[in-house]
Image (cartoon, rainbow, N blue to C red):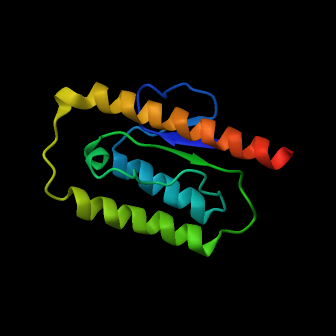
């Protein structure tokens, strides 16, 4: 498993590839990795439109295969387009950055718990 993030609270974490850049930079990095054959484990975008205002994003990828999955490539590419459309008139609010970083971290931890439950269920 590979974690791609620009969240400062994730920096130095196990299997974390830290992106020095924006939310969009994370999406581009994730898209490029999916095109190289990595699996999307968590969705590149948040379910909440409010979280699209966050400057931080953490995405979980699965192990790399020799070929890419066309559907996952489309999801990764569309995430960039949807993000740009949703945030084109966004007013940045840096005073909330640490709150957004904490929320992103909590959502990442929740995704890891769900993945663990699914893996355990399939092991039975």
Taking the spot 41% from the left edge, 35% from the top edge, the residue there is 104
Q: How many marks?
A: 0
Taking the spot 41% from the left edge, 33% from the top edge, the residue there is 7
Is 58 above or below relative to 97?
below
Residue 31 screen position, x and y as percent: 50, 60
Q: Quarter-wise, where is residue 123 in the image?
A: top right
Residue sitting nearer the eye, 42 or 92 = 42
Residue 76 screen position, x and y as percent: 48, 63
Q: Quarter-wise, where is residue 1 in the image?
A: top right
Residue 6 screen position, x and y as percent: 42, 37
Residue 30 screen position, x and y as percent: 51, 54
Q: Is residue 86 left or right of residue 34?
A: left
Q: Is residue 74 left or right of residue 47?
A: right
Is 70 above or below relative to 53?
below
Q: Is residue 74 left or right of residue 38?
A: left
Residue 1 visible in rendering: no
Residue sitting nearer the eye, 120 or 56 = 120
Taking the spot 71% from the left edge, 69% from the top edge, the residue there is 67
Taking the spot 53% from the left edge, 60% from the top edge, the residue there is 32
Residue 55 visible in rendering: yes
From this viewpoint, which residue is outermost toward the bottom? 70
Q: Quadrant of the C terminus?
A: top right
Q: Is residue 119 left or right of residue 97?
A: right
């Amino acid at each position: 498993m590979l974690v791609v993030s620009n969240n400062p609270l994730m920096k130095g974490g196990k299997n974390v590839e830290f992106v020095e850049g924006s939310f969009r930079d994370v999406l581009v990095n994730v898209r490029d990795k999916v095109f190289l054959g990595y699996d999307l484990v968590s969705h590149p975008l948040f379910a909440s439109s409010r979280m699209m205002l966050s400057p931080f994003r953490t995405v979980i990828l699965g192990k790399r295969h020799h070929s890419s999955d066309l559907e996952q490539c489309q999801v990764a590419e569309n995430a960039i387009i949807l993000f740009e459309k949703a945030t084109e008139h966004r007013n940045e609010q840096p005073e909330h950055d640490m709150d957004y970083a904490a929320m992103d971290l909590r959502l990442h931890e929740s995704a890891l718990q769900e993945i663990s439950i699914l893996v355990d269920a399939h092991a039975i």
